[in-house]
Amino acid sequence: MNDFAAPGPVQFDGAAVTVVGARVVGLSASAALSARGAKVTLVDRYDDEVTTARAAQAAEHGATLRLGDDETLPAGTQLLVVSPGMPPSAPIVAAARAAGVPIWGDAELAWRLRAPLPDGSYAPWLVVTGTNGKSTTVRMAESMLKQAGKNVVACGNIGYPVLDAVLRGQAGGEAGEPFEVLVIELSSYQLHWSSTLSPLAAVVLNLAPDHIDWHGSYAEYVNAKARAYENCQIAAIYNAADLETVRLVEEADVVEGCRAVGFTLGAPGLSMLGVVDGILADRAFVDDRRTSAAELGTVYDVEPHAPHNIANALAAAALVRAYGVEPTAVRDGLREFRPEPHRIAWVASIDGVDYVDDSKATNPHAASASIGTYDHVVWLAGGLAKGADFDDLVERHAKRLRGAVLFGAERHLVAEALRRRAPEVPVADLGGPGPDQAAEVMAEAVKAARAMAVTGDTVLLAPACASMDMFSSYGQRGDVFAEAVRELKAEVAE
């Protein structure tokens, strides 16, 4: 009998499994489940040419297709597998709950489909979540593990699905040697649909309101993040500067013997990593934590060495040290690491003013960290707020703001916060046009920012909002900004 609600291994042979979404995750899930004998029904809300072509891949593996309806639960479904973005309020989810059908996300399915490595062990999971810094921390940890000679992959909510990483070398997965350790970025969406994960080590980097529209409340968002610590085996890693993460570790139901390990930008206490005279110091994973520390490198090994990025480096170091990586590999990994685009990326200097692309700052918490890196900022902001509030951000950095240039669908929320908390800051409101005008508006925004800036300032794209109202992604938004800056520089040079 298939008991998908139980925490242990399950048999899929003959089980009726419904998979929602004919995209990357859904197609991987369908192939893997079909390879294990499940009777898969793949559903998708769309019934167009593109979706039909994608779904054909699942049909080739034996799945039954139902396109144009992702709201009705197919009769006889024993397990529902949802894509990471499927909200708890979705009709098919409500129907599954009413019928007592277990619901798994892609991370939960991946955990259940793990297979032993040649030596009989299972590849450990090092889990990263939090409101901001996840992707950078995951990539840093991956770099450190590579320097240690490990066959590692960064996966999850970072572009390479965790399910694909787990299935590598297995039936229904891609060919290749299985990974011996996984560094996994998990979003609050993925954690919401997970229940039995047991990572070797996990970190919640920080917490601030985000995705409230999806979760329904900040409390539910935090509850989802807290699942990263559940069943943690070796180290539950917290941010000493974020008391909410401390509380989550204290309340977590971890495996016996798992330790709480903190990171701080100050001098580390016992079982912590921190900074002493510019040195990254480890007092958690050394033999004598009371009287000694391991040197993991310096703040100048971290690029860029902004405070929040040093915190990311310490979190990554804690993860890999929990796995057993030597200090030299941590240092070498940091030296080899290069940030991905659109993360505090310098674009150009024009008349003594720096132009910086931090389009990845898609919520107020990320934008606050970015603004706090500079002394005086002309701030480019706006987009889709996702239910966020901007008052704390504006109040904290009011004295740094030389001016603000706003655009996007919910820019008025940022404007209202500026009026309430920093009425002296000049604001240029460029409206909320659609994608067809995005490049023109960004060019206008860059010119408006130049008019506000003085020598020594930074014009900073840190929108504090999502991008999809005007752009296809935060990446495209950053690219359009960078192009507008380069065009302005060319004009000035003429």
Image: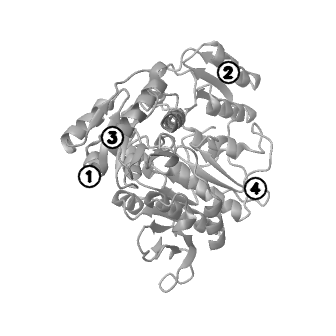
What percent of the width, then of the height, locates residue 8?
60, 49
Q: CA distance from mark 2 to mark 3?
A: 51 Å
Q: Earlier in the sequence, mark 4 or mark 1?
A: 4
Amino acid type shown at disc 3: Met
Which of the labelled discs sits on residue 117, or is there none? 4
Observer-nearest of 17 and 264: 264
Q: Earlier in the sequence, mark 4 or mark 2?
A: 2
Residue 55 badge: 2
Whichever of callouts 1 and 3 sits on the residue coming sooner in the sequence is 1
Q: Residue tagged by mark 1?
A: 399
Q: Amino acid at mark 2?
A: Ala
64 left or right, relative to 358: right
- Depth check, mark 1 against mark 2: the one in front is 1
Secondary structure of residue under mark 3: helix
**Residue at point 49% right, 49% down?**
344
Residue 341 picture quarter: top right
In the rendered image, residue 65, in percent from the top left (x then y), is placed at 65, 18
For residue 98, above or below residue 236? above
Q: Secondary structure at mark 1?
A: helix
| Label 2: how many Cα within 10 Å (few below 14, some 14–19, many 20+) | many
Where is mark 3, residue-wise?
A: 452
Task: Give the number of callouts.
Answer: 4
Q: Quadrant of residue 380?
A: top left
For the rendered model, the colour scheme is one colour
User: SS of the residue at dot 4?
Assistant: loop
Q: Earlier in the sequence, mark 1 or mark 2?
A: 2
Q: Does the residue at mark 1 contact the one at mark 2 (Cβ under 8 Å)?
A: no
Alpha carbon distance from label 1 to label 2:
53 Å
| Type of amino acid at the residue the image marks with label 4 | Leu
